[in-house]
Image (cartoon, rainbow, N blue to C red):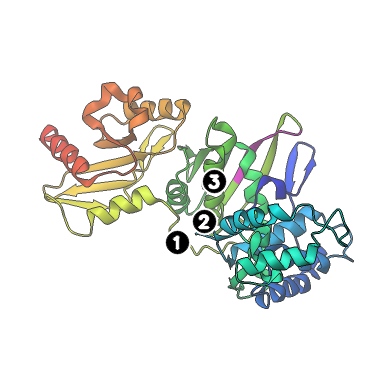
Amino acid sequence: MLTRELAVARYERGSVIPDRLTRRCHAHYRQYAEEMIRIYSVGTGCTRRSLHQQVRHIFDAEENCPSRRIDAFCKLLDEWSVYDQDRNRQSAKMRIATFRAAAPFHPLVQTTDRWFEHQQDAAKNSIAQLQGMTWTDLEARLFSDLVEFQKLQSFTPPDDPSQLLARYNVAQVQVALFDARKVYLELREDFKLVLRYAKLAGLMHRIAVHGEQGYCIELDGPASILQQTRRYGVMMAKFLPGLLSCKGWKLQARLKVPRFHIEMLLELDANSGLRSNVRPGDDFDSELERHFANAWGSEDRQQWKMVREGSIVHRGQKAFVPDFSFEHESGKVVMLEIIGFWTPEYLEHKRELIGLFRDHSVLYAIQENALDAFRDCDEIVISYKTVLKVDAVLEKLQNHLLRMK
């Protein structure tokens, strides 16, 4: 995943167009990809800085290649790599010992005389011997804890060089979405799968009926969050590969571009040509839901059976899809919606949903720090801090069952 510093895009007539490598204009980039992958494949033991320098040399003769594009390739290759980590802070300890041992030799000179008696090479050798190694070895290890001096331990290359180029194209869209204030999705196919990816990525969303056979999902973007924008931006980025694996969608993102101080648009659809490494149906990272589902298990609990995903519930133009449904052996069904990341506006939207679907059997799991907005809904609210507990859900299910009789 790229950072904002590695973003490459054009800005035309109010639109943001992320950098895209195409077969028509960049067919020769496949050779570059092969060479970059070769450098990393034979680069075990090389520092990160050395690998990056070798990659940059590949593009010495390439015209119109932004340096950010090359740096982005290096970042993506690093994600397929494992580097040595100085977990015990040995380099820092070695630096302290070296600087202390060097203090009596100050100042060092190339050639000694009656005033300056400490020759540089001799002093370095003496300092290295105190730590049981040569100066060459000591110097190589002194700063190995810094990112650029970390050494490549292993590299897992992609199956095909074109995957690096495809990943670059997706990554540039991901980083562009870091500035999204709102993202609107029109869906004609794969609605529940797209929604599932949005929920598993933890995105704040609103659902509306769109036409006779479609839906619209509105997502709050990272630029709508006042705090923790990096974390939410990562969540948005994780959503994109899943979306790209689906069919029948159109995306319009409203971006708050800092350099222009105006709102601009980014538009994509299912036929934009971006390739995803996610197979339809693959799960994303959602620790909260995964932890709860694993804790519940596959067996019934107190006559309740958990269903991973419920049906779509409509009320006018509004739609609602719960995260879980629970079916009792009596035939009663209770749905559960988990509210994770939130803003005051998103909580207000959820309060509206509670009122709209009050006649449905729905429970809401809400983080403790957002409970004040739901004090009048205690009978249908389950609070959690970081983990949603099964016992708390079961207690609310049993209480709700009694009220349904």
**Circle 1: residue type:** Asp
Left or right side of 311 for 17 = right
- Kindly identify which residue carries mark 1: 282
Q: Is residue 384 above or below residue 245?
A: above
- Tags 1 and 2 in contact by the CB under 8 Å rule? yes
Residue name at image x 79 percent, y 59 percent:
118
**Circle 3: residue type:** Met
Name the quarter where the C terminus is drawn: top left
Mark 2 neighbour density, 10 Å: few (under 14) some (14–19) many (20 or more) = many
- Label 1 element class: loop
- Kindly identify which residue carries mark 3: 236
Mark 1 neighbour density, 10 Å: few (under 14) some (14–19) many (20 or more) = few
First in residue order: circle 3 vs circle 2: 3
- Residue 262, label in figure: none
x, y percent for residue 378 = 24, 27
Range of the magenta residues?
Answer: 251-259
x, y percent for residue 371 = 33, 27
How much space separates mark 1 and mark 3, taking CA atoms? 16 Å
Comparing 41 with 398, the one in front is: 41
Name the quarter where the N terminus is drawn: bottom right
Q: What is the magenta segment's predominant secondary structure? A: strand
Comparing 292 with 192, the one in front is: 292
- Label 2 element class: helix
